[in-house]
Amino acid sequence: MLKKYLWILFVSMVPIIELRGAIPISQGMGLPIVPSYIICIIGNMLPVPIIYLFARKVLIWGSDKPVIGGFFSWCLEKGEHGGQKLQAKAGRGLFLALLLFVGIPIPGTGAWTGTLAASILDMDFKTSILAVMLGVLLAGVIMMLGSIGIFGIIF
């Protein structure tokens, strides 16, 4: 059982997959939903402060390197594009926009991209972390409801 919980913890830390993939995986493994939800939230949030503080610097540093340059440039462009899109749509409501950007589980959004976008936009650290945390909680609830079949009952 501990192996399964560690597995979903690590899956929820992976960019692009995050808890959007980890919660359905946990249900496929037959794990209880509430502990899985909590572990996936923790796993998804663990890299967020590190991303905010260091990701932009590392991506800028590596964008001109021979082997990793293409991938690093792609990540940097994705974060910049996400940040510009957020700022253009949100204006002064950047906190809510970041929360919804992270919280609505569609491909290309999530804690990694949202945190990188907040870093690129030079948002305040505490504000960024809070918005991302609330977004991760929202995405987790949506994925949890979808995983246990609530949306199938409603629609």
Image (cartoon, rainbow, N blue to C red):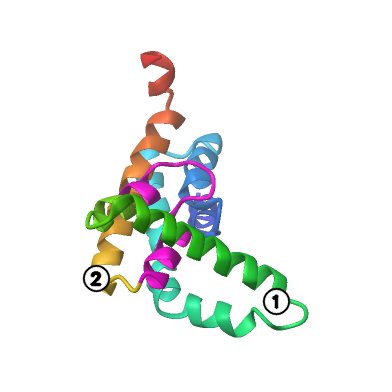
Q: Earlier in the sequence, mark 2 or mark 1?
A: 1
Q: Amino acid at mark 2?
A: Lys
Question: Can you say which quadrant of the picture contains the C terminus?
Answer: top left
Magenta segment, prevailing SS (helix, strand or loop) = helix
Query: Image check: 5 left or right of 140?
Result: right
- At mark 2, the secondary structure is helix
Residue linked to disc 2: 126
Question: Image point 50% across, 53% down: which residue?
Answer: 18
- Of residues 76 and 40, the one nearer the viewer is 76
Q: Residues within 10 Å of mark 1 (few under 14, many from 20)?
A: some
Q: Position of residue 9 (x, y in %)?
A: 48, 57
Q: Position of residue 59 (x, y in %)?
A: 57, 77
Please give the count of numbered marks on the rendered protein: 2
- At mark 1, the secondary structure is helix
Q: Which residues are magenta?
A: 99-121
Question: Image point 42% across, 28% down: which residue?
Answer: 148
Q: Residues within 10 Å of mark 2 (few under 14, many from 20)?
A: few
Q: Amino acid at mark 1?
A: Gly
- The reply to whether residue 38 is in sight is no
Question: Image point 40% across, 67% down: which residue?
Answer: 48
Q: Residue 150 occupies which quadrant of the picture?
A: top left
- Of residues 154 and 121, the one nearer the viewer is 121
Residue linked to disc 1: 69
Q: Is residue 117 magenta?
A: yes
Q: CA distance from mark 2 to mark 1?
A: 30 Å
Q: Is residue 36 magenta?
A: no
Q: Position of residue 133 (x, y in %)?
A: 30, 57
Name the disc covering residue 35, or none.
none
**Do the CB atoms of the residues marked 2 and 1 lie less than 8 Å apart?**
no
Question: Image point 55% across, 53% down: which residue?
Answer: 16
Q: Position of residue 101 (x, y in %)?
A: 38, 49
Q: Is residue 142 above or below residue 123?
A: above
